Image (cartoon, grey):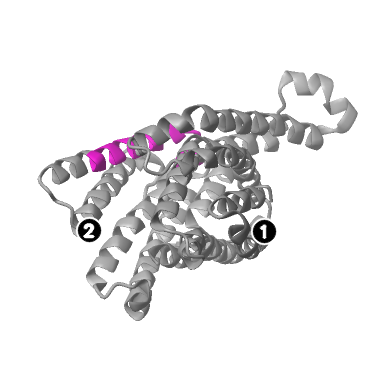
């Protein structure tokens, strides 16, 4: 439920930050954009709260305070994505990664201490996560203060960005619905909690494998965009390709090779380290079906790397957000249809087969 609400109020503003900081270097303009987006982000938080108060009963929770608390903790993470966008545009993704690791480590420590004293309430778990997110935000505010200075608000800067922001908002809504459907279809088709746990364990490995490309690729794409604007190729591509096929195609082939290489490394990582991580997640081997899901998820991780790189490149196109919305909506519709066909035929493996087809979009 909160994922859907966040999708509604997200509006893709961090992507706008990355695009602007990549394409514009004037400090005064950056200050105005940053200040304007901070105000807009505050407005989206209020919109989220209003949406929750009007619709929280469909979340199967009568405790509106708890729903608001969880939403607020996750909204801090969304807000922190603005700083990540700055780091990606400036080639400093490692700084955001350090802050993120420190935050997650602090959350784990707080959880461990609390669980040692039998603190298992949902309030305590929410507070633990929120504290980690807030620490990461504070570190980023201090670390990125040079590139995130405040100035006057200028909503006129957003006029040309209205449609990209609109399309990005629709993209996030579609993704939010898509990401929640798998957990709903497993009980719908009558599969047990054990089947759901096995699927979740396998999916955790898949998500873990995406940490590195998820952190590196946005920064890499901003770097590549700057090289494209300056017509820069590696010396090998310059010698072998440009005279034969032209700069654009040579540039595309050069970075396609890099992306495919990253995808293969990621796929091998899932195959090699996946069983080890599953052993840590499930030391008593209560859900052995998760191991048989790894090969399909490994191949899906390869295609996910390609999707990461492709969608990040497309956002720099004038109509990029519109293209991504069309493909995302098509993916969501196809995934629902594949659920209806593959899950009855293959059980929980049908989820992974569907996942593989979708990532090969």
The magenta-colored residue range is 85-108
Inter-mark Cα distance, 1 to 2: 37 Å
Furthest-left residue in this view = 117
Number of residues whose C-alpha sits closer than 10 Å to that of mark 2, classed few (under 14), some (14–19) or many (20 or more): few
Vertical arrangement, residue 279 with respect to residue 180, above or below: above
Q: Position of residue 262 (x, y in %)?
A: 60, 30
Task: Give the crowd class for mark 1: few <14, some 14-19, many >=20 residues within 10 Å.
Answer: some
Residue 39 drawn above or below residue 297: below
| Quadrant position of residue 301 | top right
Asked if disc 1 and disc 2 are in contact, CB closer than 8 Å, the reply is no
Residue 98 in magenta stretch:
yes
Residue under the image location 41 percent in, 46 percent down: 83
Identify the image quadrant of residue 4: bottom left
The part of the image, by quadrant, that contains residue 326 is bottom right
Residue 157 is situated, as x and y percent measured from the top left of the image, at 53, 61
Which residue of the protein is positioned furthest toward the right in this rendering?
Answer: 244
Q: Which residue is mark 1?
A: 327
Residue 151 in sight here: no
284 on left or right of 237: left
Tally of marks: 2
Inspect the magenta stretch and tell me whether residue 78 lies in it.
no
- Residue 270 visible somewhere in the drawing: yes
Q: Is residue 24 above or below residue 238?
A: below
Question: Pointer 2: what residue?
Answer: 122
Looking at the rendered structure, the secondary structure element under dot 1 is helix
């Amino acid at each position: 439920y909160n994922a859907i609400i966040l999708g509604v109020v997200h509006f893709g503003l961090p992507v706008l930050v990355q695009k602007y900081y990549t394409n514009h270097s004037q400090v005064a303009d950056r200050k105005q954009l940053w200040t304007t987006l901070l105000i807009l982000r505050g407005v989206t938080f209020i919109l989220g709260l209003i949406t929750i108060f009007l619709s929280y009963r469909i979340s199967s929770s009568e405790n509106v305070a708890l729903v608001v608390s969880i939403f607020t903790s996750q909204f801090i993470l969304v807000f922190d994505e603005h700083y990540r966008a700055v780091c990606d545009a400036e080639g400093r993704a490692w700084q955001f990664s350090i802050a993120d690791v420190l935050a997650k480590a602090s959350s784990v420590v707080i959880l461990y201490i609390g669980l040692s004293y039998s603190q298992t309430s949902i309030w305590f778990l929410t507070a633990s996560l929120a504290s980690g997110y807030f620490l990461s935000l504070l570190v980023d505010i201090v670390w990125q203060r040079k590139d995130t200075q405040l100035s006057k608000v200028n909503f006129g800067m957003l006029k040309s960005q209205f449609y990209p922001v609109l399309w990005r908002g629709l993209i996030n809504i579609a993704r939010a619905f898509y990401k929640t459907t798998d957990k709903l279809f497993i009980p719908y088709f009558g599969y047990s909690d054990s089947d759901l746990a096995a699927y979740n364990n396998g999916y955790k490995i898949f998500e873990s494998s995406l940490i590195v490309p998820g952190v590196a690729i946005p920064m890499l794409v901003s770097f590549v965009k700057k090289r494209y604007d300056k017509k820069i190729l590696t010396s090998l591509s310059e010698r072998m390709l440009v005279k034969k096929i032209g700069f654009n195609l040579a540039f595309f082939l050069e970075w396609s090779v890099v992306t495919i290489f990253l995808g293969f490394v990621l796929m091998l990582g899932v195959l090699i380290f996946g069983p080890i991580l599953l052993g840590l997640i499930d030391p008593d081997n209560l859900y052995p079906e998760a191991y048989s899901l790894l090969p399909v998820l490994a191949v899906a991780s390869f295609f996910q790397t390609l999707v990461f790189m492709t969608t990040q490149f497309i956002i720099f196109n004038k109509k990029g957000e519109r293209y991504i919305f069309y493909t995302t909506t098509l993916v969501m519709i196809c995934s629902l249809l594949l659920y209806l066909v593959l899950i009855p035929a293959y059980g929980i493996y049908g989820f992974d087969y569907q996942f593989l087809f979708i990532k090969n979009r």
